[in-house]
């Protein structure tokens, strides 16, 4: 019983509940400060873009490779965006219809 002598007795005190926290209010963010942050971020991005050509250590082949990658990615995006979900489902169903019965799920029954 000596181990339990040092424990505190009474109700639990939870954060955000009670007399002490009732007086606290959240501060509202100023819209002006968020605009300033956005301006700072855009100015930093502009500065980084200006520095990039001087620090560009890529070979011409690497630059051409990245340009082609971006071009192919844009083509894929445009191709996917050209069809609606309904059209894609219809195309997929047509594809499944053309497959042989080998790919069908066999019917299994416990009785013969």
Image: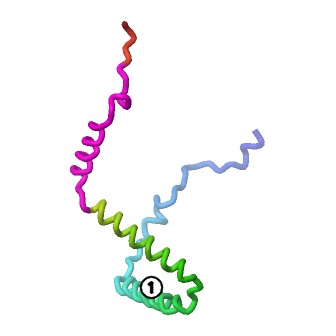
* Label total for image: 1
Q: Secondary structure at mark 1?
A: helix
Q: Can you identify the residue that label 1 sits on?
A: 41
Between 80 and 24, which is closer to the camera in this rendering?
A: 80
Quadrant (top left/top right/bottom left/bottom right) for the N terminus? top right
Does residue 16 show up magenta in the picture?
no
The single residue placed furthest to the right in the displayed view is 2
Q: In the rendering, at what x and y percent does residue 84 appear?
A: 23, 55
Task: Considering the whole magenta stretch, tell me its main secondary structure.
Answer: helix
Between 73 and 1, which is closer to the camera in this rendering?
A: 73
Quadrant in the picture for residue 24? bottom left
Left or right relative to 49: residue 59: right
Quadrant (top left/top right/bottom left/bottom right) for the C terminus? top left
Give the residue displayed 39% in from the left and 67% down from the top. 73
Between 48 and 8, which is closer to the camera in this rendering?
A: 48
Q: How is the structure coloured here?
A: rainbow
Quadrant in the picture for residue 71? bottom left
Give the residue displayed 34% in from the left and 83% down from the top. 31
- The region drawn magenta spans 82-107
Left or right relative to 76: residue 16: right
Look at the picture and state if 72 lies above or below 10: below
Q: In the rendering, at what x and y percent does residue 20 appear?
A: 49, 65
Give the residue displayed 33% in from the left and 28% down from the top. 101
Q: In the rendering, at what x and y percent does residue 9 appear?
A: 62, 48
Q: In the rendering, at what x and y percent does residue 44 appear?
A: 48, 88
Does residue 83 show up magenta in the picture?
yes
Between 34 and 52, which is closer to the camera in this rendering?
A: 52
Look at the picture and state if 80 lies above or below 104: below
């Amino acid at each position: 019983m000596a181990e339990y002598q040092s424990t505190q007795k009474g109700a639990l005190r939870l954060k955000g509940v009670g007399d002490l926290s009732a007086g606290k209010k959240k501060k509202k963010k100023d819209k002006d400060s968020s605009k300033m942050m956005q301006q700072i971020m855009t100015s930093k991005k502009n500065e980084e873009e200006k520095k990039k050509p001087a620090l560009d250590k890529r070979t011409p082949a690497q630059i051409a490779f990245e340009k082609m990658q971006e071009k192919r990615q844009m083509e894929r995006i445009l191709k996917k965006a050209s069809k609606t979900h309904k059209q894609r489902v219809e195309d997929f169903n047509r594809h499944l219809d053309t497959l042989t019965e080998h790919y069908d799920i066999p019917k299994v029954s416990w009785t013969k």
